[in-house]
Image (cartoon, grey):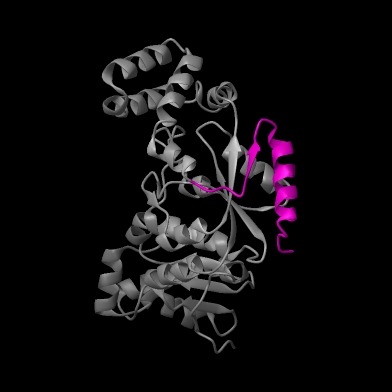
Amino acid sequence: MNPIKYINSIFGSWEKYDCMDIRPIEARVIFPIPRMTSHFFYTEKELKKLRRLGFSSVIGEEIMKRIESLSPIFLKNNPILLFDESPFYIAQAIWQHYQPTINVFIYKGGIKGLLKEAESIFKLKYQFVILYGETGVGKTDLLKNLEKKGEQILNLEEIARHNGSIFGNLSNKNQPSQESFIINLAHILSGFDKVKLIFVESEKFSLGKNIIPLSLTESLENGIKVRLTLSKEERVKRLIKEYAGKNDFKIKDGIEKLKFRIGKDVSSQITCDLEQKKYNKVAERLIEYFDKTDSYQSILSQNFDFSLNNLDIDKTAEELIKNLDKKKRLP
């Protein structure tokens, strides 16, 4: 029999458990918790009725039947961690039903506890290497190459499902809620070796609707800063490869949103080029715009530890690792 009922901390040990979100259907739809299974077996209305009438009522018996139907999951002999909200009404029922023979635990903090614990993860000290560079320089491709070489990377765009610009969601992916973004981000960070370098792309304070936590932004500011460079011609080629023909309608919508920044005549010309599939001209004009934005100007104001040309991404990755080793990177 397992005497431990509550678990107070989960980040860093998440993988030890089969994590199960057993909140009401409505709560899980509005705010899904990443990296855990969900079983939609009761509603908010049923929960209110259950709390009013108790488990000896008809609704109570029905809920217990549904809990019993989950037995194949609990018979796998893996430790199970239940995520519920205080006073953990359903979690308590599940725990009492299964815990005599199966390791079942309840996460004590609820959603607020998860977010508070995530914030503590962001405040830890990390050794970040931040990649800077203009639009089309290949920062994301370099990150992926570094990951293949066994390096630790933090892909903020992947976590937010957004590329961080007005054209950042051409694949029409649904972005996570801010809470889900924070929890997933903290989960990934908690799995890193903090004495080793973590490579991350320089981003603005937000990616689409997801805002990077201030405490993490402060840590990023203190990282090793690397400037990536590439000729305008090569940047145009990369933009065409990344965006051309992927979602012209979405690109057109983005150009429309830029109309008041770049001027009606210029936006009309870019739209015309796009409709005629003159992607080279579209990319050239957009690069001209992005190179004049505050994001580009902020790159010029930074003090970099070193600069690398990113024409050959594999060679750039090797040279980056070599340069960092020269800076006496920690083992």
Relative side of 62 to 160, left or right: left
Q: Nearer the viewer, residue 218 or 327?
A: 327
Q: Quadrant of the C terminus?
A: bottom right
Question: Height in image: 118 above or below 51?
Answer: above
Q: Is residue 84 visible?
A: no
Where residue 265 appears, as percent x and y from the top left, is 29, 15
Viewer-side residue, 291 vs 158: 291
Is residue 53 inside the magenta stretch?
Answer: no
Q: How many marks?
A: 0
Task: Name the foreground residue: 184 vs 130.
Answer: 130
**Which quadrant does the N terminus fall into?**
bottom right
- Of residues 296 and 258, the one drawn nearer to the viewer in this rendering: 296
Q: Is residue 313 highlighted in magenta?
A: yes
User: Where is 150 relative to 74, above or below?
Assistant: above
Q: Position of residue 44 (x, y in %)?
A: 29, 65
Q: Residue at x 41, y 12 (%)?
A: 273
Residue at the spot x=41%, y=76% of the render?
A: 109
x, y percent for residue 315? 74, 37
Question: Residue 113 location, x and y as percent?
Answer: 41, 73
* Magenta residue span: 302-331
Residue placed furthest toward the top: 276
The answer to whether residue 313 is left or right of residue 9 is right
**For this view, does 9 lie left or right of residue 213?**
right
* Point 56% across, 72% down: residue: 80
In this rendering, does residue 26 appear at all?
yes
Q: Is residue 322 above or below residue 17?
A: above
